[in-house]
Image (cartoon, helix red, strand yellow):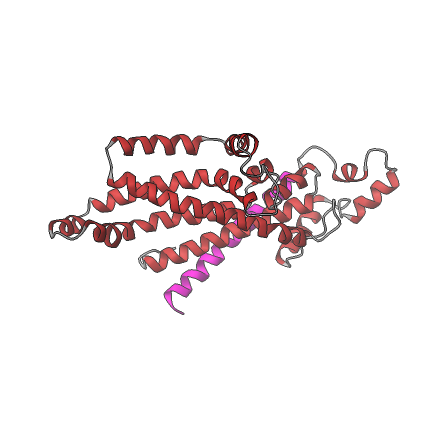
Amino acid sequence: MGSLTTYIVKRSLAAIPTLIGAATLIFFLVRVLPGDPVHILAGEQTSPEIIERLRSEFGLDKPIYIQYFLYLKSIFTLDFGTSYRTYTPVISEILSRFPNTVILALSAMAISISLGIVLGIIMALRAGTILDRALLIFTSIYVSMPVFWLGLILIYIFAVQLKLLPAGGIGSPAHIVLPSIALSHTPLSYIARITRSSMLEVMSQDHVRMAVARGMPIRVIIFNHVLRNSLINVITVIGYFVGVLLGGAVVTETVFAYPGIGRLLIESIAARDYVMVQGIVIFITFIFILVNLAVDIIYRIIDPRVRL
């Protein structure tokens, strides 16, 4: 078995405890939330007989440890159960919303990567100047903005005042613009700052100084020697944020009434839909692990010295 294959197998096996840990945590967390899901679903005026029948139907009449082991079994058989609220399979609901979240996350990452790397290059090439300091201050302020606050500002300016873009919902490419901008602000700032610091570190190395001394064109030095060697750190940050955004941009989807899995999670928590909440969190955890595994493999391919 090749070293890369061995690395992938070991890295995949190491992800299993993370998945079980996340599944256990969310199982007990949703059960300490105030409110009974059966009463919320059936209403306060429903007879005790119907309440007990629903409780038995959902398996909530069983001891907690039996519910827990049945839940773990369902994860490994990929049967996440049926929603208390909609009576549809959990996995069907998640898969129907997930494409919307993928579109939103990839749009936000496209903005973050393109603008973030460009800003990072500008800051590194102008390090110590007024422009560099101004961009550092801008990225610091930008990353500190709460996403709901930035989202409301974007809605007020571009939807309410200028009437250029829709305030929320889904249906056309225009609907994705404002939530993508709001969602991109944190990864954009991090990518810009990581690109700047990585480039400055590489630019101080001897082989770059020698390239400058030999009179090599600055464009060739930047793209062939500096930027390429700076991308490992940038790829790690990009991979982390791809996993986070694909996992569901909960606040952004709620502010813009965008029907992704993040909004589905909020709706399910409000309805105490235990199986749906558990299914979404497990799905998000799985996506996050998968993306990070892909990033680690890319990292290993770029730098074979990386070990588990």
Bounds of the magenta segment: 1-30
Left or right for 28, reference 59 = left
Q: Is residue 243 visible?
A: no
Q: Is residue 126 visible?
A: yes
Quadrant for the C terminus, please: bottom left
Total marks drawn?
Answer: 0
Q: Which residue is located at x 33 percent, y 58 percent?
A: 302
The answer to which image quadrant residue 307 occupies is: bottom left
Left or right for 166, reference 291 = right
The answer to which image quadrant residue 144 occupies is: top left
Q: Which residue is located at x 67 percent, y 35 percent?
A: 33
Residue 152 screen position, x and y as percent: 54, 31
Q: Is residue 295 above or below residue 151?
A: below
Left or right for 140, reference 61 = left
Judged from this view, the residue extending furthest toward the left is 214
- Residue 192 or 24: which is nearer the viewer? 192
Residue 52 screen position, x and y as percent: 83, 42
Residue 38 screen position, x and y as percent: 77, 40
Residue 252 screen position, x and y as percent: 55, 38
Left or right for 1, reference 70 = left
- Residue 5 on the magenta span: yes
Question: Magenta-highlighted stretch: main secondary structure?
Answer: helix
Q: Which residue is located at x 74 percent, y 39 percent?
A: 37
Q: Which residue is located at x 43 percent, y 50 percent?
A: 239
- Residue 258 on the magenta span: no
Quadrant for the N terminus, please: bottom left
- Residue 56 or 288: which is nearer the viewer? 288
- Residue 234 or 258: which is nearer the viewer? 258
- Residue 295 or 131: which is nearer the viewer? 131
Judged from this view, the residue extending furthest toward the bottom is 1
